[in-house]
Amino acid sequence: MKMFESLGCMLLLAVCGCSGAKGDPARGTVGNGGASSGASGLGFAGASMSSFGGASAAGGANSSGGMNSFGGANSAGGANSSGGTNASGGASGSAGSSGGGGTAGGPPVGVDCEQSFTDTDTSLPGCIAEVGGITFKFLPLASGKAVKRLAVYMHADTAVDWNSDSLFSGVAAWMAARDILVTAPLSPVAYDGDPPSSRSFGAAQNSDARKVGAALESFAAAFDAPTNHILYYSMSGGSWFLTSSFIPLMGGRLPGLFAMSCGASEFWADYAWDEKAASPRDQIKLFFNYGTADFLLAGEEGSVAKYKGDGFTVTEKTYPGAQHCEHPVIEPTLTFWEANL
């Protein structure tokens, strides 16, 4: 998946170079073990630059079956893969310390920076490091700054957005001004036939949600960051992952504000925590942001109804006639967060 804006410029070609309609519509049945094999990904259907910024761009056409034709051959079906090696993310640079935070005279916090990159939106230094078997890309706070809150982006399928230095465009300055540490875990899995660097949350199983959640807890602990009010945002396959398995399995341990754009699942794991209890359920608020012509519309509408029925606070913003991710993402995400912080 890919897609996102960069307020000004954006990797229209890289981030929007969608690979066929992968995922949800042909995913098959889902039980407690997660999604079964189906189509080979949840690609952006002719996604435009309006996704992360609102500016329209020339996108590819979306066919009735959800396949997209934005600069690449449509991929055929395939079974979900079960792992693979972590991708390096394509960032250059060498190791260093990714500290920030902590108390004066106290132990240092953070994780070792295995690779570095520079955020193209703000020129802030970024890091890539593995924690708990999951590769994280993040923007450390300035030295001496304590982390007040954690923000987590779940990337789109094939991780074109994750591999870009513009990954945090549109949110980096907002996060830094509020002492929020923003990070993006890389999906531990890819679709069968995809290269190891093309990781996809749309291929994730329930076990992967638990693995990502546990790694996120370790990442937060390394920075002494609270885990009871996390800011989540996602696109396409990342949104499918949050709704299908991460919230039901890990939401009770890692609650927060979930802003999910252009994606959601029609199938959901059983809850691993008591969703009927006011706490932690009331610490979770969900926002769905999607177009009415999205090929994942059934999942988006289904997830809205499911989570409302389960007692969660759910809001949504729809764009009449908008196809997959061809609508603003960052602006409504920030609005949702600011209204609920």
Image (cartoon, helix red, strand yellow):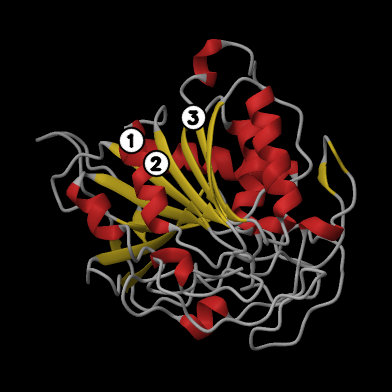
In the rendered image, which residue does mark 1 sit on?
A: 339
Say left or right for 272 vs 15: right
Residue at (64%, 88%) from the top-left corner?
71
In the rendered image, which residue does mark 2 sit on?
A: 336
Tell me, yes or no, whether the two marked residues, 1 and 2, touch with CB atoms within 8 Å. yes
Structural distance between the alpha carbons of marks 1 and 2: 5 Å
- Closer to the camera in the image, 299 or 199: 299
Tell me, yes or no, whether the two marked residues, 1 and 3, touch with CB atoms within 8 Å. no
**In this orientation, does residue 188 appear?**
no
Residue 56, disc: none
Query: Which dot, 3 or 2, sits closer to the camera?
Result: 2
Say left or right for 187 vs 271: left
Quarter of the image holding residue 6? bottom left
Structural distance between the alpha carbons of marks 3 and 2: 16 Å
Secondary structure at badge 3 equals loop
Q: Position of residue 335 (x, y in %)?
A: 35, 45
Give above or below for 118 relative to 218. below
**In this orientation, does residue 79 appear?**
yes
**Crowding at label 1, few (<14), some or many (≥20) Cα neighbours within 10 Å?**
few
> Residue lying furthest left in this view?
104
Q: Position of residue 268 (x, y in %)?
A: 76, 37
In the rendered image, which residue does mark 3 sit on?
A: 255
Residue at (69%, 33%) from the top-left corner?
305
| Amino acid type, callout 2 | Phe
- Closer to the camera in the image, 286 or 40: 286
